[in-house]
Image: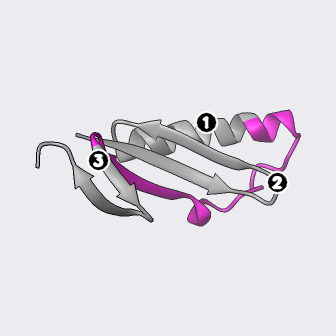
Amino acid sequence: MNIWRAEYESRNFSFCAYGLSHKEALDALYMGLDVHREQYELDADWYEKGDVYCEAYGLGVTYRDDSIIYESGE
């Protein structure tokens, strides 16, 4: 089973959100970025969607430098 992590790095903050699907993680991140925009009274286009990163991670898996080194059940 995978869990998805969406993330965005701005000059001053790091943002991340998790979901059981790619869409769920991205939707959660975008909602959080909208809340941040409102809290800091930023323009609607304050970030670039192309700078958002989303990747799947396996549960019960160990990663080193983004490479799998152990999977439970092996």
Magenta stretch encompasses residue 38: yes
Residue type, mark 2 in image: Asn
| Label 3 or label 2, whichever comes before in sequence order | 2
Residue 72 located left or right of residue 62: left
Tally of numbered tags: 3
- 60, 36: nearer the viewer: 60
**Could you tell me how far apart the alpha carbons at marks 1 and 3 are, in whole angstroms?**
28 Å
Mark identifier at residue 12: 2
Where residue 71 sits in the image (x, y, percent)?
21, 50
Give the residue at the far left of this rendering.
74
Residue drawn where x is 85% and y is 46% of the image: 42
Where residue 53 sits in the image (x, y, percent)?
51, 59
Residue 36 position by quadrant: top right
Where residue 9 sits in the image (x, y, percent)?
68, 57
Give the labeled residue for mark 1.
Answer: 31
Q: How are the residues colored? A: one colour
Residue type, mark 3 in image: Val
Of tags 1 and 3, the one toward the viewer is 3
Residue 40 located left or right of residue 51: right
- 42, 7: nearer the viewer: 7
Local packing at callout 1 (Cα closer than 10 Å; few below 14, some 14-19, many 20+) is: few
Of tags 2 and 1, the one toward the viewer is 2
Magenta stretch encompasses residue 45: yes
Where residue 37 sits in the image (x, y, percent)?
78, 41
**Could you tell me how far apart the alpha carbons at marks 2 and 1 are, in whole angstroms?**
18 Å
Residue 52 position by quadrant: bottom right
Residue drawn where x is 53% and y is 36% of the image: 28
Give the labeled residue for mark 3.
Answer: 61
**Could you tell me how far apart the alpha carbons at marks 3 and 2 are, in whole angstroms?**
31 Å
Of tags 3 and 2, the one toward the viewer is 3
| Label 1 or label 3, whichever comes before in sequence order | 1
The residues colored magenta run: 36-60
